[in-house]
Amino acid sequence: MPTRVHAIIVAHTGPSSHAQLLRTLDALTLQTRRPDAVTLVVCGDGSAARESEAVARLAEGIVEARSSTSFAEAVEIAMPRIGGDAAMWLLAQDTAPHPRALAHLAGALERSPSATIAASKLVDFDNERELVSLGVTMTTLGRSVELAAGELDQNQHDGRDDALGADIRGMLIRGTVRDRLRPDAALDGADEGLDLGVRARLGGGRVVLAPNARISVNPDGPASLPQGAAQRAYVTRVAQLHRRLAYAPAAAVPLHWLSLLPLALWRTILHLIGKRPASVFPEWGAALTEMVRVGAVAKSRRGIRSFRTASWSSIAPLRITRGQLRRRLDDGHGSEGGAASELDFFSGGGAWAVLAALVVSIASFTTLLAWPAIGGGALLPLRDTVAALWQDAAWGQRGLGIDVTGPADPFAGVIAVLGTLWAGAPSFAMVLLWLLALPLAVLGGWFAATRITDRSGLRIFGGIAWALAPTFLTALIEGRPAAVLLHLLLPWLFHTAVVAHRSWGAAGAASLLLAATLACAPSLAPAIALLWLLALIIVLSRAWFHGAVRLLWMLAPTAAVFAPLIIWQVQRGNLWAVFADPGLVWAGPQVAADSAGRLLLASGFPTADLAGWMDVLDPAIAVWAPLLIAPLALLALAAAVAPRWGAGITLLAVTMAGLATAFMAVGVSVSFDRGMPVEIWPGTGLSLAWAGLVGAALVTLDTAITMPRLRIASATVAGLALALCALPALTALHADRTVLTNGPQSTLPAYVAAEARGDRALSTLVLTPQNDGGLAIEVVWGSSSTLGARTTMLNTATEPQGVDISNLAVDLLSMRTFDAPGELAAHGIHFVLLDQVAEDESDAARAFRVEAVTALDQRAGFVKVGETSKGVLWRLDAAAAERPGMTRAEAGTASAITTIQLIVLFAALLLAIPTRASRRAARAHSRIVGRSPEEPLVLPKRADDVLEHGEEDEPEPEPEPEDATEAEPEPDDVPESTGAAPEAGNAAEAESADQEER
Amino acid sequence: MTQNRAVRVVATGARLLVGVVIAVACVAGVTAAVALPWPGSAGEPAQVAVTPTAGDTTLVCTGAYRAVGRNSEDAAQQISAGTPALTVDSSGLRDGSELVMPELDEAAAPQRFVASAEEGGAALIAAAESITLQADDLSGLAASACREARTESWLVGGAVQTGTNDLIILSNPGDVAATVTLTVFGLEQTSTKTLVPAGAQVSVPLSSIATGTQQPVVRITAAGAPVRAVLQSSLIRTLDPSGIDLQDTASSPQSDLSFAGIQVVAKSEDSALTVLRLMATGEATQARITVRADGADVQQVSVPLEESTPTEVNLDDLEPGIYSLEVHADSPIVGAVRQTTRTGAGSDFAWMTPAPQILREILVAIPAGPGPRIHLVNDGDADATVSLAPSPGGDGEEITVPARGDAVVDVSADTVYALTSDQTVHAAVMLSGTDALAGWPLWPGAAAQEPITVYP
């Protein structure tokens, strides 16, 4: 005699749910073997169900539950209504069984006495050929694995009848075990079927698959996983952690509990590397939830214990092994669709261009090869030790002044990274930077050009044009490290930011590069913010919300590193000082803030000597040197009418933003060189403008000039003009027309440098009589004033910072008799250095200096060390006080700020690490951003040449397969293909799925 | 098909038009941005004005007038030609002591006065000395104030041609020896170093360091200890002595020089009696010279100055009287004015150095000598009230110096006055008699220390 079957249907309220419910009820009436009783559990208002005739005809009872009731809880509520030994059939509103489904399920239970649960084959409601679930198992570590989900149903799995678990939808549970095999509500809606299967097996039974029992399911039913990715990640993780705690031996439970947070941290790192930042918060949420649900764990464990008869080893054969897992994994090879061709860095000649630039660089800066450190201009030595470099980059005591504690300039972080690259002698890293600047600029320009053109010749032209920018060469020969670094970083920012909306990898890299770029040139912030907003508007207008979130993330590292400094400056009402150039403030040559100066800026030159032309030619002739930029500028202007006009116009907008920045910067002085206001260096704005200019010229060359010969000729003329323009700058070092000097390795006399070697906390009071009769004072800690220790806290100060020792310094030089060494030593000062202004010392300054020497010579307790090229040095007889550490509050602030900054930067770094999946996802899109349908198609070399014709006169077929309507290239961030992002995400998930559990 | 084509042509045309408009707008925008004014901003740097604490004031006098060449066997031997009369007073305690003169065997040693600083500032002290000689080789009046030693002094004056016997007298009142660098500016620039022992006075003949220089300017830089430099000059025309002078250091280089108390005793047609010597210390510049008397411009001259090359300007055609002089240049200059009583033998001359600004109270010492007067010049835009009272505690008089005007006050010889001004004025002491001429500017006391701007 067949067993009785009692079906439980869990339904939500709402019109669409009701329609699904009626469909399910219809399917039940069509069953060849009808369930003996049906109980309907309505989560929410059940009036609609009560009024329904179909429900009344079938259901023996209707139970109302709260709308937040989960599937497992709903089943729990309905179970008392099941009478006798009736088997329980678990259904939801959306599970429409095929006519013979129940017959097959019941038959499976009858045929196999050991089976306690019969599971059906779930197929997609809309496409019944697609499998949703047929058997579930788990890995050795407990992660649930669907055995056949997402596959095309060709009955290929129908031979299998044994599985560890199955999806809970459509499960038929034998009446004898029904009461002890209840769905566990603590699983939060995931893995309930797997859990039932495990428990059934522990109770000596098994799950039998009935592949002929087909049930159509919708993806949004009460028993399916949540639709949102974050929610789904949360419930699956909660379920997994809960099962882990429930299944583990009692002794191991505390260990598992303790491991929850460390595991969450580790998996956060894996999520970030796997470009799944959306899973990070669910991960922590799941770990914290599971940590506090001790009661639920105990209850689940009790449930297992009460039913268990077999040993845990009985389920081992049904777990999926690593070998099987690996075989099952589709690594997505070939899914990229071949949209992007090979990079062709080597075969396309990019590597040769970089090599050639290295040769030119070494020929131009030959003498640098022998220099241990580079000086002159705004260059300074770096710290002796890596530890001190990083200390300068963190919130805390600054390397200058007495008791000056506060935020570090983000630029100090860039310097720390640079110095760490040559950890033995960080100052030499700066020499290397100068030697490698040209090849690195070509490299960066080449990669940035890959976003505009696929033609290898034009990419090389882009790299060379970027490296020969007059503003870059001027920064090199004038010794402006921040501007040089900016010019090297900018193309990489372009390269990554224009595709930041596409993938998390690009967004992570772009966010780091943006922070580094703005650290080198905070004055670019308004222009870049403008471009960022433009990008955000474009992305939002196309409803690419994933892209918008990635664009938002781009600002996170920048915000983290700049926030302390901004807050500090705002507290002092000096917000504009945030835009001050970092590093040494140097009143070097730069154009004046008048029309003549702006004309020079508009022609690309940040100084009045026109990158050296004024020195090598008669000024009357040299003023025409900017004409050499004209070919490039004309090509750039033509981009507005090029077929890829969207990209062209956006790049012209970048140029305008850069020029506006330069025009503005040259009249704004927020930092001071020993009391003298110094304007912001306009060359960084010109670098941004140059990026737009070269990019726009490439757009014209790539799309507007279709005749190959004309294209080659134009690029050659523009390139040769730039090369000619660069000659005076490239020969400047040999002709001794630069301010670059060999060393010094320390700005202080060798005696101090030797005493303070290794960045010992010795301090030197440096007194410099000024040309206006004033006196500049500075307290330098360590063996030298260094680039990283310079701080805009002091450079932009309008009030004395820290402990003001102005009075003491003047008294030192006056006739007053007092314990001068004692007072200096109390401030921790070890040495007094009387320096002189670098050049053109006025009579007032010289007279002051001579008087000062006389005054200090006559002071008791001052031991004259000697007159050096760096000034007259005295050592104090008195024992100097130790430098006081930070107060508790300051130390707390420092560690909190540093921790937050490190977390954000580390997250960005993890996002930026390329993985196999992310690289493959990136290859699914064209490298070029902002193609428009009107432009002629350039096919990769390997493609068939036959296709090349016909595109220009026959525009009806869209030349761009992926996203042809798109025309908004935006150098900062450019959205490009809509469908791309989710696919990329999926591919990344699939790839790293196997790593997740470790 | 044709419709499609038409749509395409229109779309392309529109696109091209928009592109051209944008390209033109870019060019026009940049052109406009270049031409139009942009807002600029400059903040105020952190700075602290600190007034140095006053110390003791040490005045050094010159002492015996040195005669050279009186011994035919040793032409370089120096002997004392006479001891000057000294006038000194101070507001508080003062110590007097003597410096040694290694080159003179037996002579009145130069005096050193130290006025201790009082609470609230430096002590006021003033001293001056004068000497009148009527010898075969030296005649005339020489007088000067006693001054503090300095680390840098400028001597603008002197000559090295035949008949002159100019000595640079260096006094070191300190306790350590000073290394003095004498840099002579002329057609070429030469430097000499000499050592001045502690508490000693030595002399350096100008002819030994400035050979061949017609119009020397000497910069004296002391290291180790400050020194006082004075130029003692004398002139013999043919065989007749024609004047002696003690010239104090000029003020440090500045772009504006003011002279007070320029005396013109006689008008001469053939030879310049009043000569201004100028030198630009930094870079070449144009000096605009204005001679003023009784509040009116008398003469205006403009001369180009080359860098580090002394230039002399004759101020001819001045009626006898008392003048003030203003020199404006675009870069720092030094200068002094040479005044002569008349042409011919037996006359006297005196160098007048620029008068710095004085404000509030100072002491003025008037030494013994003929016709002592004080010339007060107000180049400000407000009338200045100057009170002058003999010290200590005499009855004073109030003098109003009109804006852009001047005033001359007769004073008593061998008296110390307290001079107080409520506005910044320039002032000089003048002595004049028959073939006797001397003068020097008044300096602010140590109490009026300028605050130093410190850039921390």
Image (cartoon, coloured by chain):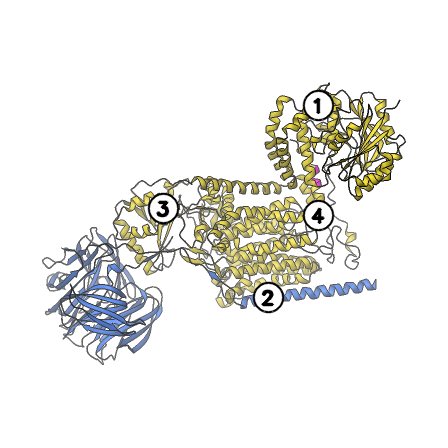
Cα–Cα span, label 4 and label 2: 36 Å
Q: Amino acid at mark 1?
A: Ile
Could you tell me which secondary element the residue under label 4 belongs to?
loop
Residue A823: % across, % down: 31, 45
**Circle 1 crowding by C-alpha within 10 Å: few under 14, some 14–19, many from 20:** many
Residue at point 19% right, 79% down? B266
**Circle 4 crowding by C-alpha within 10 Å: few under 14, some 14–19, many from 20:** many
Residue highlighted by disc 2: B29
Q: Amino acid at mark 3?
A: Thr
Residue highlighted by disc 3: A764
Residue highlighted by disc 1: A304
**Residue A901 on the magenta segment:** no
- Between circles 3 and 1, the one closer to the viewer is 1
Q: Amino acid at mark 4?
A: His
Q: Are marks 3 and 2 on the same chain?
A: no
Task: Specify the farthest residue to the bottom.
Answer: B269
Residue B160: % across, % down: 21, 67
- In the image, is A866 to the left or to the right of A460? left
Colour yellow, chain:
A
Q: Chain of mark 4?
A: A
* Magenta segment: A986-990
Q: Amino acid at mark 2?
A: Gly
Q: Are marks 3 and 4 on the same chain?
A: yes
Q: Are marks 3 and 1 in contact (CB under 8 Å)?
A: no
Residue highlighted by disc 4: A925
Residue at point 63% right, 28% down? A294
| Quarter containing the N terminus of chain A | top right
Above or below, comparing residue A623 to residue A70 in the picture: below
Label placed on residue A523: none
Q: Chain of mark 2?
A: B
Residue A253 image-quadrant placement: top right
